[in-house]
């Protein structure tokens, strides 16, 4: 609204022209988002569903009974902010609708008496990711830039959609899996959003800088940055209450929403591989858990024993007719996989004896320093 009204308001008072400045809109979006998120959490968090505690989480007891599904309040804070600062663009608002739908998919899981199954969640994530990817490319072929390749690569629609869906589903689920320690997923995602917003505004959205770095210029880069920084603002407001000991949890409603937001921003950068450099600790923490699950299921299909040693000792020999989960053989890789807990923050808490504060600070430091290093390598190796 404000960018549309700026030419008319400028006639009343000259400084109102700043409402057309992307930098001004970024600052307003982040600031207003943080304030409004804090206000909604203070007023409405008591109406949220209560956390039931995840069965295998090491912090289950601390989380159980706290308000969860806080992502709903964060989206309710974000929407009026975007209405104020977002330049009018049908595609931008279509993407916003996709973000809201992903949030609701997580929120209904948060408030359900029985958690949704993995296959149901994955199918829903994939469907929403496909919709978001199609809205993003508008059904047209797009070009992407890659490391070690000087010129952009033009992809047909089907191939771009396939790559985009993988990126979006990975971002959604890795962020969701990282949500297990007070402030951890929010802090890591906030760092990613700040770097992504800066990259979209300073590099992708700036013609001269993009040309110098051989990165395709996106004339809407600064507009995407407004969305990213506004999302970062409401996330910062949430973290004010999620710092240990937390008084509210974002739940699947929040983690899935912010995961998709990160994925969309990666697509806006023009390089799907940016997901590897912009979310290193999120992928290491949550993404490796997904990889472990896929590997164990693959070994099971190949006829290997995939139960953990502790479970094998408790169950004893497999009886005929029972689901043996792979048979009697056990691969050395399976044994290694069972030695490490996933998400990785569970391993650090339970096996390494780190405190929750140590996990948060150390993961934050690694994320903060790895992102610029990996980002420079990704951009300069052309």
Image: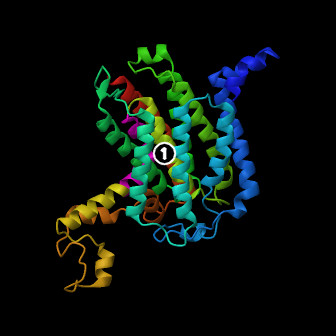
- In the rendered image, is residue 174 in sight? no
Q: In the figure, is residue 62 to the left or right of 159?
A: right
Residue at the extreme right: 12
Vertical placement of 50 versus 255: above or below?
below
Q: Secondary structure at mark 1?
A: helix
Q: Is 280 or 271 nearer to us in this picture?
A: 271
Q: Is 296 or 116 nearer to us in this picture?
A: 116
Which percent across, then down, holds residue 139? Answer: 38, 34
Which percent across, then down, holds residue 7? Answer: 72, 17
Q: Mark 1 highlights which residue?
A: 260
Which percent across, then down, holds residue 198? Answer: 54, 29
User: For the point 47% across and 71% down, which residue is it?
Assistant: 55
- In the rendered image, is residue 305 in sight? yes
Q: Quadrant of the N terminus?
A: top right
Tell how many labels.
1
Q: In the figure, is residue 201 to the left or right of 234?
A: left
User: For the point 47% across and 16% down, which residue is it?
Assistant: 209
Q: Does residue 278 belong to the magenta stretch?
A: yes
Quarter-of-image position of residue 242: bottom right
Vertical placement of 238 versus 322: above or below?
above
User: For the point 40% across and 49% down, which residue is it?
Assistant: 169
Q: Is 318 or 82 nearer to us in this picture?
A: 82
Which percent across, then down, holds residue 165? Answer: 37, 44
Our reading of the magenta stretch's main secondary structure is helix
Q: Quadrant of the C terminus?
A: top left
Q: Specify start and end residues of the magenta stretch as a single range.
A: 272-289
Q: Does residue 350 belong to the magenta stretch?
A: no
Q: In the figure, is residue 346 to the left or right of 108?
A: left
Vertical placement of 244 versus 91: above or below?
below
Q: How is the image coloured?
A: rainbow
Crowdedness near tag 1: few (<14), some (14–19) or many (≥20) residues, C-alpha within 10 Å: many
């Amino acid at each position: 609204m404000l960018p549309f009204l700026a030419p008319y308001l400028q006639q009343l008072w000259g400084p109102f022209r700043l409402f057309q400045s992307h930098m001004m809109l970024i600052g307003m979006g982040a600031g207003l988002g943080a304030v409004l998120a804090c206000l909604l959490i203070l007023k409405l968090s008591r109406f949220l569903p209560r956390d039931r505690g995840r069965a295998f989480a090491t912090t289950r007891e601390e989380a159980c009974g706290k308000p969860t599904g806080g992502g709903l309040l964060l989206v309710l804070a974000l929407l009026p902010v975007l209405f104020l600062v977002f330049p009018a663009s049908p595609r931008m608002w279509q993407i916003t609708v996709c973000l809201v739908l992903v949030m609701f998919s997580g929120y209904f899981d948060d408030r359900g008496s029985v958690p949704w199954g993995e296959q149901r969640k994955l199918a829903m994530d994939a469907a929403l990711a496909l919709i978001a990817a199609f809205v993003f490319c508008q059904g047209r072929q797009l070009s992407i830039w890659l490391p070690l390749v000087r010129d952009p690569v033009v992809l047909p629609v089907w191939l771009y959609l396939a790559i985009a869906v993988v990126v979006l589903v990975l971002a959604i689920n890795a962020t969701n899996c990282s949500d297990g320690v007070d402030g951890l997923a929010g802090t890591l995602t906030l760092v990613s959003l700040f770097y992504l917003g800066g990259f979209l505004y300073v590099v992708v959205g700036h013609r001269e800088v993009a040309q110098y770095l051989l990165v395709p210029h996106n004339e809407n880069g600064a507009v995407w940055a407004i969305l990213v920084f506004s999302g970062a603002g409401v996330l910062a407001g949430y973290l004010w209450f999620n710092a240990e000991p937390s008084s509210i949890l974002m739940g699947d409603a929040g983690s899935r929403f912010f995961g998709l937001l990160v994925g969309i921003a990666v697509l806006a950068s023009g390089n799907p591989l940016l997901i590897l450099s912009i979310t290193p600790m999120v992928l290491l923490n949550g993404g490796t858990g997904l990889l472990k699950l896929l590997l164990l299921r693959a070994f099971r299909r190949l006829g290997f024993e995939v139960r953990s040693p502790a479970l094998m000792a408790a169950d004893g020999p497999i009886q005929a007719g029972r689901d043996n989960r792979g048979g009697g053989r056990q691969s050395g890789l399976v044994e290694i996989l069972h030695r490490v807990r996933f998400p990785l923050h569970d391993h650090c808490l339970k096996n390494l004896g780190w405190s929750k504060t140590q996990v948060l600070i150390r993961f934050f430091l690694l994320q903060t320093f790895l992102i610029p290093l990996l980002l420079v390598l990704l951009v300069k190796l052309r």
